[in-house]
Amino acid sequence: MSTSTPDGPPAAPTAPAAADAPRSLRLEDWLIVLTMAALALITFVNVVVRYFTDASFAWTEEISVFLMIVLALVGGSAAVARQLHIRIEFYADGGSERRRQVLAQFGALMVALLFGLITVLSVRVVWDDYRFEETSPGIGVPQWWYSVWLPVLCALTTARALQLWARLRRTAAPSAATEART
């Protein structure tokens, strides 16, 4: 699966599922763009206010931390859907085609399992934040306003991992049938 360049060593193998990733990733892509824009705007406003008044907005740090967490979770979801998540390439890209397919499917299932578990457990965190009326340390708004997004975004990553797994199974089925004939 690796391609060679005219002057040098073979290029890294390409992930088959990354090329046919779902077009429905516009949601994640737009959320990333909007989150980055909000982070840049908040930081810019705080720097300008601090420069001209020697004071800063106290709420900017709390909102920025929240937005960075959202950015990481949404980016992780997009990476999983495109099969660009972290893996050990020595194992994931080595060996036979069948071995790579099995490992990719196993990885997608493990990501789905992990983020499904985080989704379930973080619902409890949100419920506790709501029930005990926790407030955020900087602004004093209800903490669940922030924590409610953890199970939502982890569920999105779980769904994307399951989509990847299904896509990998569909692409593995024709190649397995071809290998059985030979």
Image: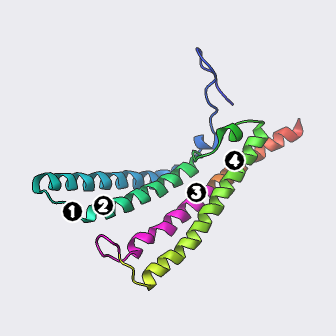
Give the residue type that dot 1 points to: Phe
Residue pictured at 78% horizontal, 36% vertical: 96
Q: Say if the magenta span includes residue 35.
A: no
| Label 2: how many Cα within 10 Å (few below 14, some 14–19, many 20+) | some
Work out whether mark 2 precedes mark 3 in sequence or the reverse, and give the earlier one. 2
SS category of the residue bearing label 4: helix
Give the residue type that dot 2 points to: Glu
Residue 61 is marked as 2
| Label 4: how many Cα within 10 Å (few below 14, some 14–19, many 20+) | many
Relative to 101, does residue 71 appear above or below in the rendering?
Answer: below
Residue 160 is marked as 3
SS category of the residue bearing label 3: helix
The quarter in which the C terminus is drawn is top right
SS category of the residue bearing label 1: loop
Q: Which residue is mark 1?
A: 57
Inter-mark Cα distance, 2 to 1: 8 Å
Q: Position of residue 129 (x, y in %)?
A: 44, 79
Work out whether mark 3 precedes mark 1 in sequence or the reverse, and give the earlier one. 1
Q: Residue furthest bottom?
A: 131
- The mark lying in front, picked from 3 and 4, is 4
Q: Position of residue 164 (x, y in %)?
A: 63, 52
18 or 64, nearer to the observer: 64
Inter-mark Cα distance, 2 to 3: 30 Å
Q: Magenta stretch: give its range.
A: 136-161
Relative to 127, does residue 41 appear above or below in the rendering?
Answer: above
